[in-house]
Image (cartoon, grey):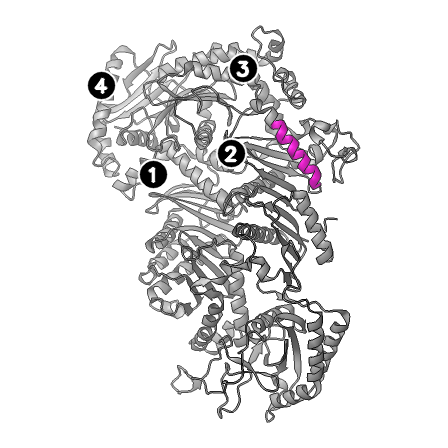
Amino acid sequence: MFKVLPAALMVFLKTKGFEMSEWDASLQLCVFDTSRGQCDGHELDKILFFYPTDCPLAAQLSLIGLGEGLITFTKIFSPDAPCDVIDSERRLHVLFQPEQGLWMIMVLDKRKENSEIGRTHALQAVLREAHGLFTLFYGSLKALLSNNPSGDIARSCLHAFLPDYLADLLTGKKLLMMSSHFALQERGSVQMTALDRGTALEVQSLIDLLQSWFGSGRICHTLLLFQDLLVSSTLSPEDAAYLFTYARMRLTPAAISATSSGHSLKKSPLREDSGDQGLEVFTPRPLQRDKWWRDHDGFLITDAWGVEAQGMSAIIPTVWLHQSSEECMQLVAYQHKQLTVIMLISVVHLAADIDGSHVLRNQVVDKASNRLSVLEERISRDWGGINANHVPGYRYLWVDHDSRVSKASPGSKITTLTKDSLLSLDKVRAEIDAAKARSDRKDPAQFRELETCVRTRSNAWVVVRIRGSHELYIVLERASETLLLTAEATEKFSRRHCDGIFDSD
Amino acid sequence: MFSRNCADRHTCFGLLALRFNYSPYLACRTAPRTCTSYSTPLGNFALIFGDDDDGPCYLPSYAPEKAEDDRDLLSSEGVNGGGADATSEEGTSEVQEFHRNEDEYPPSQSPSDVNGFKCISYNMKELDLDDDRRSAENMEGSCEQAKDSDIEVEPAAGNGHVEGYKSYASSECGGASKSGQGQDTDLLKRDLIPGKQHQNEDDSSAAWRRHKKHFFILSHAGKPIYSRYGDEHKLAGFSATLQAIMSFVENGGDSIKYVRAGDHQVVFLVKGPVYLVSISSTDEPLRALRRQLDLLHGQLLLILTKSLEKCFVKNANFDLRPLLGGTENVFSSLIHSFSWNPASFLCSYTCLPLSHTARQAAGAALQDVADNDLLFALLLSDSKVISLVGAQKASLHPDDIFLLSNFVSSSESFRTTESFSPVCLPKYNSTVFVYAYVRYLDTDTCLILITKNSEAFFHLKDCRARVESFLMETHVLRDISNSVARGGLRVEDLPAGDSIYGSVPRSKRVGTVGDGKASNSTAAGTKERPGVGGAAGLWHFIYRSVYLDQYVASEFSSPTQTPEAQKRLFRAYERLYASMHGAPGGSHQMQYRRDENHVLLAWSTADFEFFAAFDPLAEKSSAITVCNRVCQWIRDVENDFFFVGASPFNW
């Protein structure tokens, strides 16, 4: 079997359509399906998405040729974990296989990204998040492709989603995550607000109330946010993380359109379906900016999913959850000041002839709005402000991978770190990523325990402690500290702010 | 043109030398008889020694009429291209000289092919029998001589060093009883199986794909030059695939450097028309893997010089493999050293522990023979440097020492015969051959004299005799063999008590600090702490002097005496070093890392770098105290563990 592989691969790479061509772009992103376009001359059929869209086809084919070639090649030695990074003099390629046979490749131009690109795992997390959010709104790519073998629907969904997602990552033409405080963030985790016992009980009671209603449909899950922090969720950690990420991007008070005035439901431009029937299908753009606004009753409205034929009301967004057998649910959001309630309603429970959202709106406004208002005031009063998580002298990140929760120094404080410290932190985190991957390969069930203290050139300390699923990253920029004083400071932090999880004893 | 007594690979190498305008003093190594053949455009000549050692005899070992056929063969292979005239001229002049000599010396039998090394070998077994006997006698009676000799070299312990070293040096006479201990602890080093392994495998075999570390050298046309495992012929398709991948990226104006796939890493290195690739699942840092490819390329240059590139310029499909015939051991030994020799990632060399006086005596012996003809003189014990001198303004790079010692030590032939071999020192000058006179003075001690003069054999032979005689007279050879027998530093032998524990409270000195396996031994009895290594659970350390480009590593102590533990520690050091030096924006000054296997401490200053491994339960404070003391202690006895050059000949 492998005897013929190299020769076949060589021929494949040297196929006329796969000549490596130079394309000058800071960032490229492509999604392709290795099971498609197997015949000569049909290679373009592999491509489901390519950014930038104006990239010449030859360059697109060359990238996919390289990716597919190296995936095939690395399977010779590593059949279970094919290629995930390709590094060349000028570019860094990060590969991710979100679904069997489907690949995403992100290409960064090193010359244009001034900062060092260290953590490839962080870049893979971007691809994982992009796919997770895509699946949240459109379902799995495999399902889209099996329902529509021509791939047109999958392509239109990817084109409706990924450019908006990338727009959030890019500042100008640079990847935002490379140049700021992302070194102390964990993509794919949620940040919680601290609640006292009484408030937590009140939150629980309110959620129970909401989920007990059977009006137009059953509220299956609720996600409660205060500002951009999670208060409560009834979802699985994975679904909660993706929905939380979306809510932070588009639904928080700071993210929605500033004023509701000026917004009116317009019939969105329709996309032509490729079929001969002339059916017009609208592909929602969940990440389109300024498409959410607050209605007079406190509910959030968007026309990103389109508008009903009459043009009177917006189509209610739907999401697909991983935890409930990929059941499609309606997403309804209510906002009172800093508090945002996201309710997921099971579509199968909806009576066909009833405007479910209308009934729900009335119920929330009548029975829950007062309690939500009180809750918002209570949390506002207890909340320590945007610097609530700041611990003087420390710049830190604490992640619990089991519950996908993270807690970190405020972004404004992290940016005070010197570039040296940030680069060293990035380097150390890349080493830790590798060490974790190494230990997972040997024994995934093993309780992980690592400790690292590194003194950088500029006398700052980067400290990492890992206990099981908990990870703590700290940067201390106190030049006079010795290793022992640094260890002591870390112990103190662990005792005071991490419930002693990272204590040495 | 080719000797029929030699395999093609030998003559091709000789041919290459001609082709590159180098001296035709490039022929096959011959053993056991004392003959050497020369490939020249007009025929082959054997250089043979008589038992009376009165000089070489040159005689044709190949009928000149056969030369015409071989020249045709050469042309058809595309080796002897447009530059043939120049090389022929040089070859002819050599031939004239040989004919002159031919009249003077009687003919002898033709050389027999042994391993295809391209060096001239002079079998000196009979000639040096007396010397060998003397040497053996000297070894056996070394302890006695230490007491009786008038020309006593001052023992290291009496050299004004700190108490700690006394305990180390005082075992000198007991060296024989502890013989081999040093080597025994380094299990990784002993793992090497000479020659190429798994010769019959290829990329279709599952076993081949499962090897943890592959190395490939190929030409830019995709022709295989070397593969660590498997038969290069059978791997031609695989080699072409690697070339296709690299060329594919190159066509886009880029150059592929690295691919990661799960726990596998593929590293690419382009060196002109030579491509080097490693595919490994050994968890080594990228920086270390790149350096290994660089060293592999250096080893290739050491054998063939950078002029090999000209072959590919003339003919892209040039097949380099015949020129490397017989060098499998060199490459396999080098690759093996990547998993045990810290020099492979430290970019430094290590010295044999020796009293300052003895090292000075060795240096004096080398300086005594230093003249215009001599470029470098090295005295090595295995891969460890005893002393070296170099011509003024000439410096020998640690990598060149590493590659040269690997080249010499990986061939048994060098051990048994007196050799004069063309080599290239890639960091010194990668484009030319220099000539290395190699002679083992005893089992481990090897003298290498390097010259630019291809005719300097007899002069260097005399030099060797003078050096050897001096080393014998001053008992330095005895000191060397004692040091070898004693092995390197052991953490258990580090001085105990306050000199090492410093301010650690006495309660913590008992047993090892923070170690559950601690015994009730006292601080003074470091050897009474079984299973915990040295002080405070110190298992192992490496100290690298930045300004000397030298390092000293302790022997592996009892907790790290399994090959797995040693390899794990070696890899951990590699990662520490890569992290220390690979940090963007500058070196990491200090690192503390703890996992389930060990506590690692790394310290980088302007003067030295220090890496230490402790028991995973070791306390930070004790570990730091021990590190400080060890660093101080090593600086105190620096002259015994480092070669501190002071003479104008030194670099």
Spatial separation of the CA atoms under disc 4 and disc 1: 30 Å
Kind of residue indicated by mark 4? Gln
Which is the main secondary structure of the residues drawn in magenta? helix
Q: Is residue B379 left or right of residue B94?
A: right
Of callouts 3 and 2, the N-terminal one: 2
Q: Which residue bears the numbered disc 1?
A: B320
- Which of marks 4 and 3 precedes in the sequence? 4
- Determine which quarter of the picture holds residue B15: top left
Kindly check if marks 4 and 1 are in contact, taking CB atoms under 8 A apart as contact. no
**Distance of label 3 from label 4 (alpha carbons):** 44 Å
- Which one is in front in this view, the residue at disc 3 or the one at disc 1? 3
Estimate how packed mark 4 is, as few (under 14), some (14 to 19) or many (20 or more) residues with alpha carbons within 10 Å: few
Q: Please provide the residue range marked out in magenta.
A: B619-634
How much space separates mark 2 and mark 1, taking CA atoms? Answer: 28 Å
Q: In the structure shown, which secondary structural element does the residue marked by tag 2 occupy?
A: helix
Along the line of sight, the residue nearer the viewer: B508 or B311: B508
- The chain letter under disc 1 is B
Instruction: Estimate the x, y position of residue A296 in percent, counting from the top left.
Output: 59, 87
Which numbered marker is on residue B96? Answer: 4
Instruction: Assess disc 2: are there few (<14), some (14-19) or many (≥20) residues with their C-alpha within 10 Å of its C-alpha.
Output: many
Query: Which image quadrant: the N terminus of chain B?
Result: top left
Quadrant where the C terminus of chain B is found in the figure:
top left
Q: Is residue B519 magenta?
A: no
Residue A441: % across, % down: 59, 53
Q: Amino acid at mark 1?
A: Leu
Label 3 sits on residue:
B476
Badge 3 local density, few (<14 within 10 Å), some, or many (20+)?
Answer: many
Q: Is residue B642 left or right of residue B114?
A: right
Q: Do badges 4 and 1 share one subunit?
A: yes
